[in-house]
Image (tube, rainbow, N blue to C red):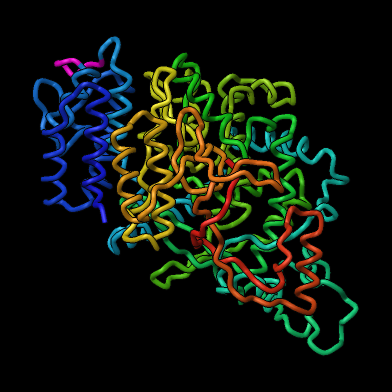
Amino acid sequence: MKSLVWLSEQVLLSCGTRCGVDPIRDIQRVTDRTKEEGDSFLTITLPSFCKGFESGLDKGFLEPSDLSGFRFRHGIPVFLRGFLSKIFGTDGKLLEKPCLDCIMCVRQICLLHKKVELPCSPRRERKAEQAFLKCERELSDLSFDDDELVRDFERVAAIVLSDILAGIPNGDPYEELKPCHGPGKTQDRIDGNSKYTFKRWHNRLEEEFPFTEFGIGSLRNHGEENSPLDAVEFVEPEDEAPVRVVFVPKTLKSPRVIAIEPVCMQYTQQSLLKFLVPLIESGGYTGGRVNFTNQTVNQLLALRASENGRLATIDLSEASDRVHQELVRRMLRVCPILSNMVFACRSTRAKVPSGEIVTLNKFASMGSALCFPMEALAFFCAIVASRLHKAQLPVTGRNVRECSRLVYVYGDDIIVPADEAPAICDDLVRFGFKINRNKSFWTGKFRESCGMDAYDGVDITPVYCRRTSPANRRSHIELVSWVAMANQFYRKGLWYAAQKVRNAVESLTKVSLPFVGKNSSGLGWVSYSNASTVHRWNRELHRFETKAMTIRPIRYSDPLEGDGALLKCFRLIGSQANDLKHLYESVKRRAFTLKPGWVPT
């Protein structure tokens, strides 16, 4: 099993070759400090070093205070000095023509292990819980009364939402809703097909989502044995189970906060999600600007902005947790029927890992299906309102359309005009949002949005190690991750690192993996020529095929019958589902196995 330090060494050697730098001393420093500090040097300290480096690119000079913990000599850190001397001068100022390869390699070295999927320490999880509770306290002190900017926000939202729902009679989406279950876990700890046999239904849902319309397949068996109405418990608001707050791996510095919803809430939220997302993505004001399924819009804009400097990229901290429920209520005021539906399936309380139950001031945390649509609309309307407010323009449809140009939102990744970015950030703070200053850029030539890191028109996005190295050939998740990482190294031109990872993988599999095309479903290596290893000609399908390891889902017996089976079948009508065994088996989430199979070249 290869260590994280071993992988860093291969990347340093590969980057040294690419940039004409001797990395031997840097390798020794990485080795020594990892022995002293553990893997946190690779997963926390080096990413922090990169933040200081990016700040230097943004400001045009390096500051020792941004790179604390690293020794400076003649204006440049001793660590990675060979690379940094081709980017900054001895006075610490950015060179007129810095080496773009060196910029890419410094970030690659520092960020390699930033996103490795390892559990945070208990101390950091407790810190994350305290941050969650602190956020709630801050939101409770937030007031939107007597604020002209908030009134402009409401007017903008009225215009935007009216346009989104223009094709819906009376703004009532009831006939358009198609509820379904999401793939995630539930507060009730119910998975798979069992979700379709409801045991609890919240009374708050009844007015907007009647159980007899949404929760059962047919009313014909009402009153008979095993009737769904006899099996379900209708729960009063005070007896509703709170969402279960959990922490999942994000970075070793801080975990990601997820709120796991009850089955009935998740089910109804999904119906609104599927209704709203297509309308938002095709709206007259939001179409092409508020996206949920296409990140390339923000990525290409960030790439161009790094060259021409016209746009800024803004990142929000705790984005989901800082959207106040009152702000969403005001945003949806123009469409009361939709507002009632949204808040009927919004959970009002949360239970944190320590056992404390809190009443939520936020609209919803990640885990709610409505989290992303509501936060994206809130960010979009807030920014447009800010631009109108600063320009002292009345809120009209024409002005909203004009000020929505050059505003792009994908989750918490936001793009706005660079010259207006400081003022927009100040106004976003007035709405209760929190700007991540370390990941927001509007000066210099560095931009970052939706996984695209760019400098001066060049993609400098690093390759991330997402998993520790596979221990053996049965470590399927790790094997797939390392094959993907090797292929990304290859495409980035880090061929030495790519070859070393390939060798490590093949020493475990005991076989040489084939070359496969970029769209192949088989596990193998890519090449610039898109070459494929051909093993046979399939006479029946008339195509060349390669024998390769393929990903197969792990299934378990999960029979569903009666009204629950009927309900599921009705919900699948018109979908792309073609699994004929879906009533007998379910797929285990986040788990798979590798099996040999024939795939097209």
* Quarter of image, res 11: top left
Residue found 65% across the figure and 65% down from its top: 265
Relative to residue 158, is residue 105 drawn left or right? Answer: left
Q: Residue furthest bottom?
A: 225
Q: Is residue 273 visible?
A: yes
Judge by depth and name the residue closer to the eye, 394 or 321.
Answer: 321
Predominant SS of the magenta segment: loop
Q: What is the x, y in percent for residue 373?
A: 63, 46
Say if 257 sits above or below 83 in the image: below
Say if 239 sits above or below 298 in the image: below
Say if 506 sits above or below 386 in the image: below
Q: Is residue 93 magenta?
A: yes
Residue found 58% across the figure and 73% down from its top: 556
Q: Is residue 147 visible?
A: no
Q: Residue furthest top?
A: 96
Numbered range of the magenta stretch: 89-94
Q: What is the x, y in percent for residue 470?
A: 34, 56
Judge by depth and name the residue closer to the eye, 44 or 285.
Answer: 44
Which quadrant of the figure contains the N terminus? bottom left
Judge by depth and name the residue closer to the eye, 286 or 151.
Answer: 286
Relative to residue 295, is residue 436 drawn left or right? Answer: left
Q: Is residue 362 magenta?
A: no
Residue found 42% across the figure and 61% down from its top: 247
Q: What is the x, y in percent for residue 136?
A: 46, 56
Relative to residue 407, is residue 204 drawn left or right? Answer: right
Which quadrant of the figure contains the C terminus? top right
**Total label count?**
0
Residue found 48% across the figure and 42% down from its top: 433
* Quarter of image, res 437: top left
Q: Residue furthest left?
A: 73
